Amino acid sequence: MTGRRRLGLVAAAATLLSAAPLSAIFDTWTWLLQCLLAVGLIAGAAVLTRSMRLPTWAQAAGMALTLLLTLTWMFPSGDELLALIPSPATFNHFADLFSQAGNDTRSYGVPVPDRDGLLFIAVLGIGTVAIAVDLLTVVARRPALAGLPMLAIYSVPVAVYVDSVPVVPFVIGAVGFLWLLVADNVDRVRRFGRRFTGDGRDVDVWEPSPLAAAGRRLAVIGVATAVLLPLIVPGLNTGLLNKLTQVGTGVGGNGTGSGGNGRINLFASLSGQLNQSQTTDYVRVTTTEPDPFYLRFGTADVLSTAGFSNRTPTGRPLSRGIVDPRQNADTDGGTYQQYHAEVEITEDFGQTLAPVYSSTIDVDGLDGGWSYDPSAQVVFSNRTTTKGKKYSFDYVRAKYTPGQLRQSEPLAEDDPIRTQFTPVPEDRKVEALVARLTRGKDTPYDKIMALYQHFSRDNGFTYSLQAADPEGGASAISAFLDNKTGYCQQYAAALAWMVREAGIPARVAFGFTRGSTRDGSAYVLTNRNAHAWTEAYLDGFGWIPFDATPAGSVVGSSRSEWAPDNDRVDTPSASSSASSAPGAVNSAGPGASSRPGNDRDANAFGAPGGETPSGGSSTGLLTAGIAALVIALLLVPALRRVLVRRRRHAATAAVTATPSTGPVLPGTRQVTVTTESIRAREDAHAAWDELVDTMVDYRVPVDPTETPRHTALRLIREAELVDAPAQGVTLLGHAEERARYARTPLQGEGLTTALNQVRRGLARTASRRTRLTALFLPPSVMLRWRMSLSDLSATWLTTLSRGRDLLVRFSPRRLLASRTR
C-alpha cells in the first residue's frame, strides 16, 4: 500500500477518534456504529479512486457520493431506487430530518435518545469532516489544518452540554490528531530515501527511527501534561484546556461561564431533568412565607413557529440594589407582604441563573459576580455558577382577587411592554381558536381566564412526558392543540402564545414547584420539581403567574384564587383543600407523598478519635512543624505577588515635570529627553505591568494585540467598573499610551492610587473563589513560574541532547577496528 493510501486510512481513523466527544451527547452507541460504517465506506472510496489514479476532483466526488448513498441507505424515505439510489422524496425526507433534529434539540436535554433526526445530523457531520480531513491530509498535505474540522466536532458538546464536558473524549481526539501528524511526517521522511541513525547505521523501512520515537514520546508527555497539570495545580484554570472543557453554563457568560458567553436552552434543560430516570436533590429552600409559590430562575420571551426561546439577560450588579415593586407605580396593585428565604444549592445543580422567588427586593450571600435583570426578574452571572452556593433574600408577595385583576385596562398599542411581549407568528388555527374563546370578554383578565380554562380535562387535555412532533409544516403549538397531550413545557408555551394572540403581553417562566418533601422547615426540591408556567402582564399589577398544567400530574403544584385548578373536584378530600383566603392553594398530585428524611449529617466526620498516646508531645511538635512548613510553602506565591506589587508601586511615585532650557535653533523642533521623562515612562510601564497582572489574577482576559486604550475600555465594560475604579483604569491606560507613543509621557499623576482603586473594584465584582485565588495563589505568579519551568525544561533537554551527542561521538566502540556493521 502506498503512502497516500495509508495516510488516507489514518485520516479516517483520526476522524473517528475525534468524534469521541459525541459520546457525551447520545444516550446509546448507535451513533458510533453508524459513523463507523459511514467513515469506513468513505475511506474505502478514497482508496479505490486513488488506486485508479483518478484526479483530485474525482476523488472528492467519489467520497461525497459514497456519503450520500450511505445516508440514503441508513435513513430511507421508502421511495429510493433499488433501496440505495436517492430520489426527490429522499431529499425531502432529509429536510424533514433536519427539522426534526431542530425540534429535538429544543425538547431533549443531554444525553439524548436515538432520534432519527439527531443521528442523521451526526452521521452527516462526521462524514463531511472525514472527507475534509482526507483532502487536507492526503491531497493538500496540510494535516495541521485538518485539526480545524476535527475541533469543530468537539465544539458541539461544548455548546450544548449543561455541565462540564468530560476530559477523556478530548484526550482521545487529541491522540487521533497527533497520530495523523506523526503518520504524515513519517511519510514525508520516507520520501527522502534511505534513513540513518546517529551512529551511521541504516534503518529498515519497518523500523522506527530514533527521532520519530522521541517525537512520539514528547507527544505523549505533552498531552498528559496538558490534561493533568490544570487538574492538579490550583490556579491554572485560565488556559485553553479550561476554555475547551467548560461550558458557559448559563444564558450569558459566559455559558454560561465564564462563565463564557454560552446559553442554556431552558426548554431542553427542563425536558432533560423531567426525563431522567433517577431523582436528584437540587435545592433546599426555607421561607417565612407559610404558603409559598414557585421558585423561579429564568424566562423565555422570544417566540417563533418552533416555540419560545430565552434571551441573554442584561442588568446591573446586585450591589447596586433592586427596585422594590411597591415603589413602582406600574405594579402597585394588590396587597403586598414581605418574607425572607434562605436557599442552599447542591453540587449537582450548577447554572448561571440563581433560583429566587418573584418580586425579590434584596439578596445577600451572592458575591459581586451576580447581577439582576429587572425585566425578566432573574438573578444571573457571567462569571460563576450556582453550584454549592448558599444565599438568602427578601421578597414581597402580592395577593390579588379576581375583582382587582378585572380593573386592569388594556395597554396602549405603542406601549413598549406590549410591543416586546405580544408578537406572534402567523397561525390561522390559533387565531381562530383565540378569537372564539375570547369572544365577548371585555377585560384582559377575563380573556386570559377564557384561554386558561380551555386547558382542562373536560376539553380532552392530558399530561404526558411524550409530546408528539409537528406534522405537515404545522407549528409546535398547533401540534399540541391538536394532540392535547404534553407536559408543563407545552402547556406554558401554548397558553403564553394564545395570550399574546389576544394582544396581552405574556412569557414562559422556569423554576421549581413548591415540592412535597420536607427536611425540617426546608423544602427539598429535586429534578422532579422542575416546572414551567405562564406569566401574563396586567397594567397596574405587573407579571401575574398562570399555571395551566394539570395540577394532579405535577408534584408540588400550587394554584391561586385568580387562577384555580381547572380540574379541581369541589368535594373536600384529605389530599387537597381550597383556601378561602386570597393566595396560593396547594394541589399536590399523585406521587407527592412525603418520604422519610435522610440523616445526611450522621457519621459525617467519622467516629471520635482515641486518646493521644504517651510521648505524643514530640509527635505533636513534628506535626505542627510540618503543617507550618506546608502553610509557608502555600504562602510563597502570595508573598511573591506582594513583593512584585511593592516593587512596582515604589517605581510609580509621582514625578514633577521639569521644563527644559537652552537655545532653540530656528526651523528645528526640539525633543528634550530628561531624566524625569525617562522615569515617567518607566513608571507608566511598571503601572501597566501591574494592571495586566491584576487582570490575570482576577480572570479578566488579556489580549496583547490591543492598545492600552482598548484594553482599559474593555476592562471597564467586562468587570463593570464604575466611579473611582473606572477612572483609575482610564488613567493607567492613558499613561501607558502616552509612554508608548507620545513624545512626552504623562507626569505628575498618582498611578499607585489608581492601581489600588482598580484592584478594589475588581475584587468587588469577582466571585469569592476568584478573590481567594488572587490572594493566595495568584495566577500571574503561577503563570510566570510555569513559563520559567518550561524554559528550564527546554534548557535541560538541550543540554542532555548535547551530552548524548558527545557520548556517541566519543564512543569507545569507534576505537574497535573490527566493528560489526
Image (spheres, rainbow, N blue to C red):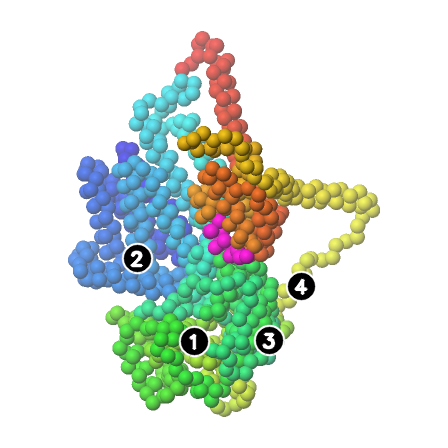
C-alpha distance separating marks 4 and 3? 32 Å
Residue that mark 1 sits on: 534
Count of marks overlaid on the render: 4
Dot 3 or dot 1, earlier in sequence: 3
Residue that mark 4 sits on: 602
Residue that mark 3 sits on: 339
Q: Hey, what amino acid is under mark 4?
A: Ala
* Circles 2 and 1 in contact, beta carbons < 8 Å: no
Q: Nearer the viewer, residue 543 or 98?
A: 543
Q: Quarter of the image containing the C terminus?
A: top left
Residue that mark 2 sits on: 120
Q: Nearer the viewer, residue 141 or 504?
A: 504
**Is residue 364 shown above or below 150?**
below
Q: Hey, what amino acid is under mark 2?
A: Phe
Residue 347 visible in the displayed image: no
Q: Hey, what amino acid is under mark 3?
A: Tyr
Name the element at disc 2. Answer: helix
